[in-house]
Image (cartoon, rainbow, N blue to C red):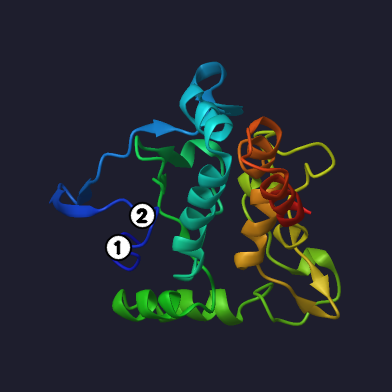
Amino acid sequence: YLEVARGRRGVPALYGGWIDQERVYYVVQRVDASLVRRGTRGAPSGRPSPLWLKRCQDAPVEAARALLECFRSFTDAGYHMEDLHGSQFTLNDAGEVFAIDAPESRPGAPVAATLDWALRRPKDAARRTHGPGAPGRNCSRDDDCVRTSDMERCALRDCIRGFEAGARETRGWCRRATCVGVDARTHVFDLATRTWALPLILQEGRFPSSAAKRRLEELIA
């Protein structure tokens, strides 16, 4: 992911790495503070960190733009973040937002096919693309289709009221006898419903004009 998306906004720079006892270690750009506070027992919460809250209040348009650019950096490259929560993202002093945990390649995306070829995983590729419940496969009910992780379905209770179940396609969705898979639109839903994302900016931001705030309201709607 760090190499495929190198140079995109929101992607930490990869400086190098090494292997020690069959484990791979990476040296990457330091990207500062998490967007959310830690909850009980160190678990991530939906409450914004002081630095992110201040950024959302003082520069709401810039904060929204940085968040959108970060998500675009991996969705445009063919990735999807199933393990989605606020601690996966950080903010630096320049106001840039970074994804610090590698997202997963989407089935059918060119990058997924490239990785399967490079790692010689033809069986895994066939299962993800053509196996039972894969996107585009025939189905008769929602249970026939693949579900994503609980984190994508607001397991940490970090979604605004009324949207706690997450995007429809994350729960397994059989639509017109075909399984619907996640794509970039799923993260559009996430950005509009996570308490630490665009709703926070809309609620706390001191916007330069009513038109700027209205534009964000329309984007969330």
In the rendered image, residue 53, in percent from the top left (x then y), is placed at: 55, 28
Helix, strand, or loop for circle 1? Answer: loop
**Which sits in the foreground, 107 or 216?**
216
In the rendered image, residue 23, in percent from the top left (x then y), is placed at: 22, 49
- Give yes or no for contact between labels 1 and 2 (Cβ–Cβ under 8 Å): yes
In the rendered view of the protein, which quadrant contains the C terminus?
bottom right
Residue at 52 percent of width and 49 percent of height: 67
In the rendered image, residue 199, in percent from the top left (x then y), is placed at: 69, 40
Q: Which residue is mark 2?
A: 11
Residue at 50 percent of width and 62 percent of height: 72
Q: Residues within 10 Å of mark 2 (few under 14, many from 20)?
A: many
Residue at 25 percent of width and 53 percent of height: 13
Q: Which residue is mark 1?
A: 7
The alpha-carbon separation of the residues under discs 1 and 2 comes to 7 Å
In the rendered view of the protein, which quadrant contains the N terminus?
bottom left
Q: Specify the amino acid type for callout 1.
A: Gly
Residue at the far top in the pictured view = 40
Residue at the far front in the pictured view = 209
Helix, strand, or loop for circle 2? Answer: loop
In-image side of 28 versus 200 (left or right) = left
Q: Height in image: 100 above or below 119?
A: above
What is the quadrant of residue 144 in the picture? bottom right
Residue at 49 percent of width and 70 percent of height: 76
In-image side of 114 versus 125 (left or right) = left
In-image side of 104 versus 205 (left or right) = left
**Which sits in the foreground, 26 or 31?**
31
In the rendered image, residue 176, in percent from the top left (x then y), is placed at: 86, 80
Tag of residue 182:
none
Q: Specify the amino acid type for callout 2.
A: Val
Q: Residues within 10 Å of mark 1 (few under 14, many from 20)?
A: few
